[in-house]
Amino acid sequence: MSFMIESQTELKSIRDELNGNEAFLKAQSVLLHIFSPYAENELLENWIMKINYFFGDIKIVGTTAGGMISNNEISFEAIELVFFIFEKSDFEIKTYDLNVLSVEEVRNDLIDLFSNIDHIAGVEFLTTLKTNKYISLLDLISENINFPLFGAGAWCVVYDENTLPKIFNDDIYDDSIVIIVYYGEELHIKSDYCLGWVPLGKEMTVTSMDGDYCINEIDGKPAVSIYEKYLKVKPDSHFFEHISIFPMAIIREGRLIARTPINYDKQGRLFFNADVHIDDRIRLSYGNFSYILKDSREMSEKFSEFNAQSILLFSCRNRLNFFGEKAMREVEIYNENSLVVSGYYSASEIISKDNKINVLNSSLVAVAMREGDINLTYNCDQEKIVSNQSREQIPYLDRLLNFLEVTTQELEESNRKLEKLATSDGLTGLYNRRGLEQIFTYEMNKRTDTQNLAVIMCDVDFFKQVNDNYGHDIGDRVLKGIGHAIGKCIRKQDSAGRWGGEEFMVILPNTKLKSAKSVAQRIRKTIAELNFEIVGSVTVSAGVAISDDETLMENVYHKADTALYIAKKNGRNRVEVFRDDTDL
């Protein structure tokens, strides 16, 4: 049951209605969610005091919100009261102050909590903008959950430095998390999310960061400059209003996610309420009205098949900015199947997918709940669905954006082909010298202080004789076969290429000298066992070196090449390792 109220005088009538509700009177448990547009402590305290007066026997959790969603209504002034009435199920609420407790302490307590509760159907996770620590907490508990986890970050209708978003349970917090564990043998919870934003334009790389939530530079330039360059938006008092509907799109583990800045500084840095990684490949994205509604409709239909008794929506404030006066169009989709819908507009969204808990921006997370078995005769208002679908004609702007999207995809595909041609060896299919240099630089920038980068240089023994005796066509076949063999001998994270002529290089990230030597020996033995047509067998010599404190490729290459020279000098068909005391 969901109620929108603007006056405390309405609380008594809600209590009277509940007292006349048979399901409420017979309930195993009742949880009251409060979604508030007010973030000022004094106002919140007054409302919570009044709500406790009328509903003191009901457990309460709540959050400030950027807008309240209740069935076919969106409000920016009313407080929303959502009663979860469970016939046979129950819940447990935990609050953690991350100013007092460490992430590890909270993680251990949550694991104990989860292990001691039977039949967990799902976990709700509420947090605030100040609590960035929660993201590392989510990473720590990801492997310990086998149930849906969902939630959002608090927001508020009027947000400034003096009015921070809050969450509340037994008290009001601006730097904590509230956890609600739902459990019961007959309780079923299904969660999913949709985005609908589409990447457009040039792919860029995060090249400098300060921590996990601040981008210093993108493609070596101040992060804020990408908005001025591509959108003509300068950092001023209207900056976030203008960029919020153009979030950064990132591919993470095969999924498209969005990141939207929440602040910037004079140095041109951008700050986020969700994690970003160094070397993340990003593109600006745009909201496609038709795509967003299509994704929401598909998700809503899944929930109707689930026979949801209620739907809880956590929708990003950016969707509200994008839709404007048409925001109800998306909410209406979830009411088409006579579903009870409630929720709010949030700062960030949280959902578990494929054993990973994701923090999202610009997304909508929907949570469906049901007690009991699926009723296959769920009510579905087909006339309303047909009516709403007929309204979803593709606007002219969406057609133009679709044209730009397809054009961008075609340009990207062409660029990928050109890049592959520019960094690949035409004979062996391995990387060429340019490609190897790019990979070396990338791996050196990515490594930590305790990680080494290993390099193997291989040279075909007496290859000139192969060309002289059998011709260059046969020689090319030998080089092609050797390149294929080297590729089979290395790991997925390693890279192999043709350095030039009959010389090959292998780059092995995070590899110690002993392991690199073993790889070189495997390559040498594999090639020695090959039997080439006409030529027969050939051998290679190899030199191995690691980066240690070196950062320049030419220095590491010189070490590996020196070791290769020693291998040739000592009889060929062998592996030598460079050491500082190597005697030439």
Image (spheres, grey):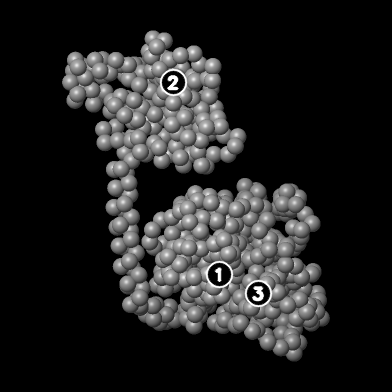
Q: Which residue is mark 1?
A: 316
Q: Give the Cα separation between the discs numbered 2 and 1.
A: 58 Å
Location of residue 204 by image quarter: bottom left
Decide: marks 2, 1 in contact (CB < 8 A)? Answer: no
Q: Is residue 66 above or below residue 584?
A: below
The one nearer the camera, 298 or 449, is 449
Question: Please, what is the three-letter code of the amino acid marked with disc 3?
Answer: Asp
Q: Give the Cα separation between the discs numbered 1 and 3.
A: 18 Å
| Res 84 visible | no
The one nearer the camera, 536 or 53, is 536
| Res 434 visible | yes
Decide: few, some or many residues near mark 3? Use Cα within 10 Å; few <14, some 14-19, many ≥20.
few
Q: Which residue is mark 3?
A: 160
Decide: few, some or many residues near mark 1? Use Cα within 10 Å; few <14, some 14-19, many ≥20.
many
At 41% from the left and 19% from the top, the residue drawn is 564
Q: Give the Cα separation between the discs numbered 2 and 3.
A: 62 Å
Q: At numbered mark 2, what does the secondary structure look like: helix, strand or loop?
A: helix
Left or right, 73 with reference to 126: left
Q: Position of residue 511 (x, y in %)?
A: 53, 30
Q: Which residue is mark 2?
A: 562
At 57% from the left and 34% from the top, the residue drawn is 451
Q: Position of residue 277 (x, y in %)?
A: 54, 51
Q: At numbered mark 1, what does the secondary structure look like: helix, strand or loop?
A: strand
Q: Position of residue 88 (x, y in %)?
A: 70, 66
Decide: marks 2, 3 in contact (CB < 8 A)? Answer: no
Decide: marks 1, 3 in contact (CB < 8 A)? Answer: no
At 36% from the left and 18% from the top, the residue drawn is 540
